[in-house]
Amino acid sequence: MFRQAKWDEPLIFELSKPGRIGFTLPEPIEDVDVQIPEGLRRKSLELPELSEPEIVKHYTRLSEMNYGVDSGIYPLGSCTMKYNPKINEEFANHPKVAFIHPYQDERTVQGALQIMWELEQWLKEITGMDRFTLQPAAGANGEFTGVMIIRAYHLDRGETQRTEMLVPDSAHGTNPASAAMAGFKVIEIPSNEQGMVDLEALENAVSERTAGIMLTNPNTLGIFEEDILEIAKIVHKAGGLLYYDGANLNGILGKIRPGDMGFDVVHINLHKTFSTPHGGGGPGAGPVGVKEHLVDYLPVPLVEFDGEKYYLNYDLPKSIGKVKEFYGNFAVLVRALTYLKMMGREGLREVAEVAVLNANYLTQKLKGTRGYELPHKELRKHEVVFSAEPMRKETGVKTLDVAKRLLDFGLHAPTIYFPLIVHEALMIEPTETVSKEELDAYVEALKKISEEAYTNPEIVKSAPHNTAVRRVDDVLAAKKPVITWRMYKELKEKGEVDY
Ligand SMILES: *Cc1c(COP(=O)(O)O)cnc(C)c1O
């Protein structure tokens, strides 16, 4: 029988057997004693003793407990979990890229500066903005950078009364959080029946206290804010600025540009739209672009090109300062530029087309399935939000149960319970990198789960049944976190855990 890896797999230290060898350490460097002060020297080093095949099997087994973009469809709504092309890695790991140092003299890293400069040109063209900083390490870091720029702009003009940031109720949680961190009071703007910003509510909310509005378009329901030009007019007329949360750029890539919609500041998630690795604790990148009137406030340094050589420009007296060390996560920038160059202009347009097609194909196939309902408009961009509220009411099966049951089918769950304005939300974003067969299989699984909910709800409520980790008690996990193997062993010995 296939041995499914389990959460309590032995540690590599427990598998150790004295005398087994899997790796030979290099000869010690001569006169190492001279280089390392006595007090800092390690007296002993306990490494597990295993043969090479044992090590390979151990880690392969552990990897089988996980699920990633290389395992199958990963349709986490809003997260754009697209395939990460392997050629990105080839360039990011090239010795000329991997072995340079941020303190090197500019003359010796012209290639690296060129990479950053070229990436900026691509991003400017794609978004319709005038300048970019590549420094922020993630979307949320980009948001913070962007709202700090908005703050600096108003303060610089003596408009100290602009203390309010408008955020729609469909926004990602990082939007109000970033605004609050930058010192703004967050004003929530409700959505209308169609799932778009309520213009009347917006009119009523703007005032001389308005610093700006943070929007993503298409919004988190996957719906394009058709009134965006009107929204821009209302906010600008009140003296506020428009911030574009670029997490949903995949739905409009190469088609329309935030800069043309009236946005003054944008952030882009390279780890979403531009195929760099996402999640797992690895670094991301959230470049921030601005229109001409905000360039002075960008973080330092900016990469410049004088026609002959590339150089770093620290001469920005009004800069908000640094938001991350050096130039951001450089290896991520290399991956994104590789992707852009591989795709090209036409390829990027096709990304948006296929991402939108896939989301709408899935919507049409799943629509009408018992228990799932489609609130708001029918046509979507790159993602769709279903509600399993009817299923919960009729069978007691909740969205969380559906998500857990999907794991039994070997499929990753969608984003659930977000956006907050949809009850029992299932937010599905297939991206352009899944095949029709994968989409069909996903819809089939969701239909099968609906059937189960109405005939045998217990099997859904107690899912997952065949994963390495069964359903975790997330309340207990938050209140009494057991985060190391040693903690677990100690509690187990004392009889304080029953798993
Ligand atoms: C992912 C996301 C963010 C935040 O980006 P991070 O890189 O995760 O910090 C912001 N807004 C929306 C709509 C997102 O989907």
Image: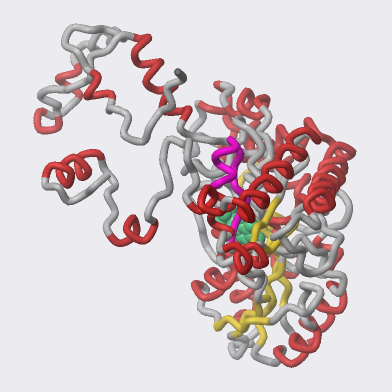
**Which image quadrant for residue 245?**
bottom right
Question: Among all residues in the image, which is located at the extreme front?
Answer: 455
Q: Is residue 377 left or right of residue 465?
A: right
Q: Is residue 218 left or right of residue 179?
A: right
x and y percentages locating residue 215 in the rendered image: 71, 69
In the picture, the quarter occupied by the C terminus is top left
In the image, 211 versus 139, the foreground residue is 139
**Which image quadrant for residue 34?**
top left
At 17% from the left and 43% from the top, the residue drawn is 492
In the image, 362 versus 93, the foreground residue is 362
In the image, 420 versus 104, the foreground residue is 420
x and y percentages locating residue 481 in the rendered image: 29, 54
Q: Check the image and report above or below for 64 versus 318.
A: above
At 12% from the left and 42% from the top, the residue drawn is 493
Q: Quadrant of ligand 1?
A: bottom right
At 52% from the left and 48% from the top, the residue drawn is 459
Q: Is residue 257 left or right of residue 156?
A: right
Colour convention of the picture? secondary structure
Can I make out residue 305 in this image?
A: no
x and y percentages locating residue 451 in the rendered image: 67, 50
Q: Which residues are magenta?
A: 404-416
Question: How many marks are shown on the rendered structure?
Answer: 0
x and y percentages locating residue 122 in the rendered image: 78, 45
Q: Check the image and report above or below for 471 versus 288.
A: above
Q: Check the image and report above or below for 478 versus 88.
A: below
Q: Is residue 410 magenta?
A: yes
